Image (cartoon, rainbow, N blue to C red):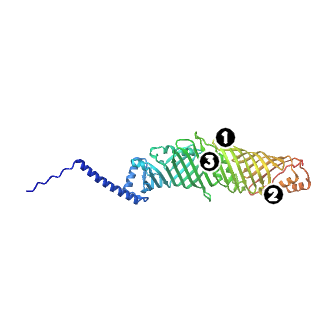
Amino acid sequence: MSKPDTPRPRRKPHQHVARFGLWSILLLSLAAGALVGALWLSMGQPLRAPGWLQERIEARIARELPQVRVSLGEAELVVEEGWHPRVRLRNVAISTPEGAEILSLTEFKTGFALRPLLDGIVQPQSISLSGVVVTLRRDAAGRVALSAGVGPGSFSREAATLPQLIAQLDGVLQRPALQALTEAELRAVTLQFDDLRAGRSWTVDGGRLLLSREAGVLALSADLALLSGGAGVATLSANYSSRIGASAAEFGVSFEGVAAEDIATQGPAFAWLGVLRAPISGAVRSGLNDAGQFMPLNATLQIGAGVVQPNARTRPIPFEGARSYFSYDPAEALLRFADVRLRSKWISAESSGTATLGLAPDGKLSDLVGQFTIRDLRANPADIYPAPVGLAETDLDFQMRLNPFRLQLGRVQISDQGKTLLLDGKLSARPDGWRVALDGQMDGLTPERLLELWPEGLKPKTRTWLVENVRKGRSATLTWRCGWHRARHRRPMWASIMPGPMCSF
């Protein structure tokens, strides 16, 4: 007789749970290992999102932002070294619900902060945009506006000055969704700068802008190529830094090959450059104080070969190059020139001095009153001398107006071989040419020095008479008046000089 089967002992409920938990942990571990292995094998390789996922992304954006329509050409996921996930979107088009284009991007990339992502919070850590078209506009009153894209829904910001416009980024960066953002980059930027105040437009192509945030400090840098219609391309590099939430900021611009007339339009401190036709390279630094007001500006300019030509009809006066270091205090409207050096066949000199700006109610330069000391002056205008004539030192007071150009000489004191020459007069650029009028008086002049300063081609009969008849005059006084006019394509420059009576030798 067989024994009845012994019933197996029933497992307690907690034993089923434990068994299921062990299998679950094993399966999850295997799945995680497979996922980690797949991600490791594809590290740095883009994983293209399927079409259904792109449609869900577009639908989610439509629910969150019903005022715009977003279409994606392609979406990819990349896991970079350090397990930093990054999403890349290509051919992004943003339009109104009616289909009008607002903004299009060649490429949009964003990397996410890993720690918030583990908690289910999506916060971009880096952003990169490519193919952005931006318009910067300055109106007649000097206010600036920045817009990206076209159409009624395009992004737009306004401010009184460009640094204040940049400062508006502070509010954007303080939003919770961007708390983890440390870097943003814009590549292949096309910038259209419309300056209504100057009546000019410039195009920047292939630009690059980089924004970074570290320890509460916002830093911006930009590298741009300026297309101004000429044969060459000018380059600009700019930087800006400020503590987020503060008004104080520092900024600087360095440039190479920018036309003098382009720089002259950027503020009253540079308006005097408008009489030049030459390429300029250099650097400018300034900032804003805690009240948001401009601090003193410091500039270094290297001016290439060019001409002085206030208007298109005046005869250009050539020069080989010039260099200038100056500062500008906007509170006093005062320019301080620590060093100005000019090189040309006509005149070469070193000088320093100050100039007070007279500003019109609209902020434009109306006139400039200067006091300069000129050293090591050597002159040979239009090659009227066999060799340049040198003068020891000159003190000069003048008033300059730009439109139309007029230089009023209040006092010119020239020291020469122990004697003093005093001059006053004016120089103006009219549509029919240059006009010059001078009055002068000197406390003494030797016959030898007189002949050195008197060009041989000027009034040759009078000069010959002086050579033959004047023998002494070391302590004599000389006074004269002269003036000349040269229209373009007309008689030689000095042909109409009208010397007055030369007497008291």
Classify mark 1: helix, strand or loop.
loop
Q: Residue furthest left?
A: 1
Nearest to the eye among marks 1 and 3: give it.
3
Residue plotted at (85% across, 53% down)? 449
Determine which of the numbered discs, if any, sits on residue 385 in the image.
Answer: 2
Q: Residues within 10 Å of mark 2 (few under 14, many from 20)?
A: some
- Earlier in the chain: of badge 2 and badge 1, it is 1
Q: Can residue 427 be seen in this snapshot?
A: yes
Asked if the residue at tag 3 contacts the one at tag 2, i.e. Cβ–Cβ closer than 8 Å, the answer is no
Residue on which the image places disc 1: 332
Separation of marks 2 and 3 at Cα, in angstroms: 42 Å
Separation of marks 2 and 1 at Cα, in angstroms: 42 Å
Relative image position of residue 176 (x, y in whole percent)? 45, 44
Asked if the residue at tag 3 contacts the one at tag 1, i.e. Cβ–Cβ closer than 8 Å, the answer is no
- Earlier in the chain: of badge 1 and badge 3, it is 3
Classify mark 2: helix, strand or loop.
loop
Nearest to the eye among marks 2 and 1: give it.
1
Determine which of the numbered discs, if any, sits on residue 163 in the image.
Answer: none
Determine which of the numbered discs, if any, sits on residue 285 in the image.
Answer: 3
Separation of marks 1 and 3 at Cα, in angstroms: 18 Å
Q: Amino acid at mark 2?
A: Tyr
Q: Residues within 10 Å of mark 1 (few under 14, many from 20)?
A: few
**Viewer-proximal residue among 481 and 80:** 80
Q: Amino acid at mark 3?
A: Arg
